[in-house]
Image: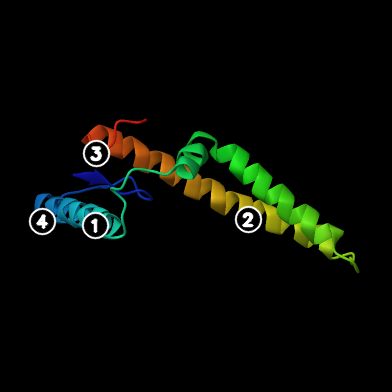
Amino acid sequence: QFRHLFRGEIHTRLNDQRSLRFHEQDHETLVRTFWAVDRFLGGERPPTRTQKFVARHPVLLALLAGTVWAAYFLLLPGVQQSDFVIAPVGGFLLGGTLGLTAFYERHRQRRLRRLGLWDGS
């Protein structure tokens, strides 16, 4: 049984349990496929020194990358008015992308420790 979000009605379906199992199986298949691709691309190798640093300091990486991008963009000759909008937005997007990548690396390293593939040193 589930409550309809808009009308507050309760509906029952005979197929709900089968449907739920089907969606759980899809989720498990996607997760297994993701980790298989990760293994194929070398995701179970121990991290390098740079990867360890990035995983320990994801916010620092994001701030440095965004700041360097914005500063470089604004220090170029011939800066226009629109550059004062583009530089911080581009820095935010670049820093955000690299920060999320660093958080993924942190998660990957935790997984390697949990699976016993890396001792954390």
- Mark 2, Cα crowd under 10 Å, few <14 / some 14-19 / many 20+, is some
Q: Which residue is mark 2?
A: 93
Q: Which amino acid type corresponds to the residue marked 3 in the rendered image?
A: Leu
Residue 30 placement (x, y as % from top left) = 24, 57
Give the colour scheme shown.
rainbow
Q: Is residue 80 left or right of residue 67?
A: right
> Which comes before the other along the chain, label 2 or label 4?
4
Q: Which residue is mark 3?
A: 117
Q: Is residue 36 above or below residue 2?
A: below
- What secondary structure is found at the residue carrying circle 3? loop
Dots 2, 4 in contact, CB < 8 A: no
Q: Quadrant of the C terminus?
A: top left
Residue at 45% across, 38% down: 52
- Mark 3, Cα crowd under 10 Å, few <14 / some 14-19 / many 20+, is few
Dots 1, 3 in contact, CB < 8 A: no
Which of labels 3 and 4 is toward the front?
3
Residue 3 placement (x, y as % from top left) = 28, 44
Q: Which residue is mark 1?
A: 30
Dots 2, 1 in contact, CB < 8 A: no
User: What is the number of the mark on residue 15?
Assistant: 4
Question: On the image, which quarter does residue 115 sit in?
Answer: top left
* Residue 88 seen anywhere in this rendered image of the structure: no
